[in-house]
Image: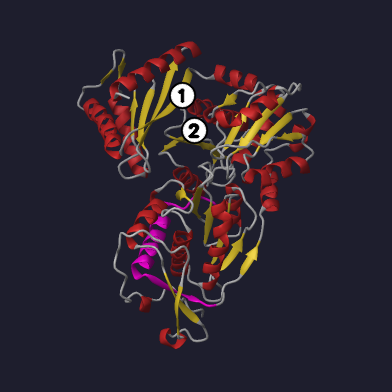
Amino acid sequence: MKILPIAMSSISAVKPLKETKEPVTKPEFKTETTVPATNLSFTGYNIQKKLINVTLSKAKEVSKSLSTSTSGHRAPYGSENFNKDIVALFTLGVASYVLDHYPFEEKNPRVLIGGDTRKATTECLPLINDILTKQGIDVLYIKDPVPTPLHAMAARDYKVDLGILMTASHNPWTDGGYNLVTNNGAIAPADVTQKVAKYVNEHAERGFCYENLTPIGASQELYPYELYKNRLNSYNLIDWEKIKNSGLEVCYDGLQGTGSYVLPKLLEEYGIPFKEVKSNGQEGPNPTSGNLLLLSDKVAKLPAKLKIAISNDGDADRFGILDEKGNFINANDVILLTAYHLAKNHGKRGAIIRSQATSMQIDAIANMYGLRKIETPVGFKFIGEDIIDLRNKGEDILVAGEESGGLTINGHIPEKDGIIALLTIMDLVATENKPISEILTNVKMELPKCIVPDNYSVKLLNDKDKEKLMEKAQELFDNAQKGYNKFGEKHYIDAEKSLLHRKNMEHYKPGGDGIKLFLNDGSSVLIRKSGTEPLVKFYIESVGRSPVEAQKNKTILHELMNKIFKV
């Protein structure tokens, strides 16, 4: 049986270092001494003792970020909150977790590692590989930049014990990101991240770790492109030949991210013509309308009848889509179109899952086809958990998504996939042989009411001001429960519906997920605070009998929110 050099109880009695608030100045792990193997009963192993250059207070801070965030730990690379020492400490936490939770007799536990195109990723992956293999863990190593959905699929299909994904997604280029992925192909849930965080803090408190001088775990390189392509084809939802023969002109901007390593290759392989646009100068690889101006200009100038502009964010789990005129199509509408296409043109059925910040217009598709509706807190990890739970019960989804630009579909991984989102919309345009703006207009005309979503953020001076706004939102909720439910001059809060929604959010997340108020005319407002900065996010969804009326109501609610919250 293999010896577990990091998870032995005999080490736990070592006196920890004293906590200090001094900033970390040492950039790398330092070898202190070589410890004779006989002292630790590690017969046959050459063990060394290495210092951990992260204070306990800093370890607690960053491990909390890793365990509570909806998308791992992110911060500027090279800062005191994200550097090689912190990456090494996180990786030791992962090593302890898999060694303690996945017993083995004849083989090592196995961890998948990979990430995006950022400096933090390219510099830290070799370090992660070295630490894991020296702890007796086998590594599946994706060295080339890999989209998050491909990494998630590999974690699932290779049945690894855990995946480490280095990406800061759509954040500024200066950031690094450290994320955990399960062998379900989903973002690690709280019960996993909290345990890893516990090990991280234990290592920091001890102040050092033991490792083998040479790797006792194997490292194997792979790239899951063929795996991903074959899985896409097994769904029979992307008709490559139909897209190719439709005359659809495609412009693609991967924003210098990982999507550029996969989507163009797929289009080339199936003979689908496209023009690759390479934008420069973005603060971060985020497919917003403001970052896609060059792409918008390119598609607007194409003479083709059918044309579309598509984009991914830095790790290709999100999407950006522009219509034939170069107009940005918001994520709510893309999710709506995806659900419509899968249900109508492909005959698929299943639950529709959306975050509470995502437009309820998608619920209308569920009602039209008699499908189950599920609403979660913001964060795809909650959606992913529900997808896994449904599938364990023999059910599936039609589509699941969130307004920030991520979705997944029937039969696919329980993680955001911006590549399959783009391909599904291309399949829709080719199937209906109409410009996407026309398809969207027609779909919205079929909905029983007009719905206009909107969201914006307010940056405050400090966390104290942020909490004051949230206290005001809570006051509105509490007063409505007491019967004081007036909201402006024309609106009233539906206290019962708001309470039921609150209880549902608390089922997923202690304390809920912000304050959502449902109004008497079917509109709603959601107030959520940022967990990382003095920022409050407002989401408004207005309804009307016509697009003009719904837009007018949105303006009224926007002005009312600003007045109530004095922003």
Report how many numbered discs are placed on residues in the image.
2
Q: Are marks 1 and 2 in contact (CB under 8 Å)?
A: yes
Which mark identifies residue 403?
A: 2
Mark 1 or mark 2: name the one nearer the start of the chain: 2
Q: Residue 323, image x and y in percent?
A: 64, 24
Which residue is nearer to you in this view: 310 or 54? 54
User: Which residue occupies 59% across, 40% down?
Assistant: 418
Residue linked to disc 1:
453
Three-letter amino acid code at disc 2? Glu
Across and down, in percent, residue 434 comes to: 70, 21
Tell me which corner region of the image, top left, top right, bottom left or bottom right, holds residue 137: bottom right
Task: Report the magenta residues as a range.
Answer: 185-213
Would residue 189 be counted in the magenta stretch? yes
Q: What secondary structure is marked by label 2? A: loop
Q: Name above or below for residue 250 compared with residue 303.
A: below
Residue 263 appears in the rendering: yes
* Residue 523 numbered tag: none
Residue at the outermost front position: 25
Q: Position of residue 84 (x, y in %)?
A: 48, 60
Q: Nearer the viewer, residue 276 or 357?
A: 276
Q: Would you call the spot at circle 2 few (<14 residues within 10 Å), some (14-19), or many (20 or more)?
A: many
Vertical placement of residue 480 versus 201, above or below: above
Asked whether 283 or 445 is in front, the reply is: 283
Where is residue 538? Give x, y as percent. 38, 29
Residue under the point 41% across and 65% down: 53
Residue in the foreground of this view, choosing between 4 and 481: 4
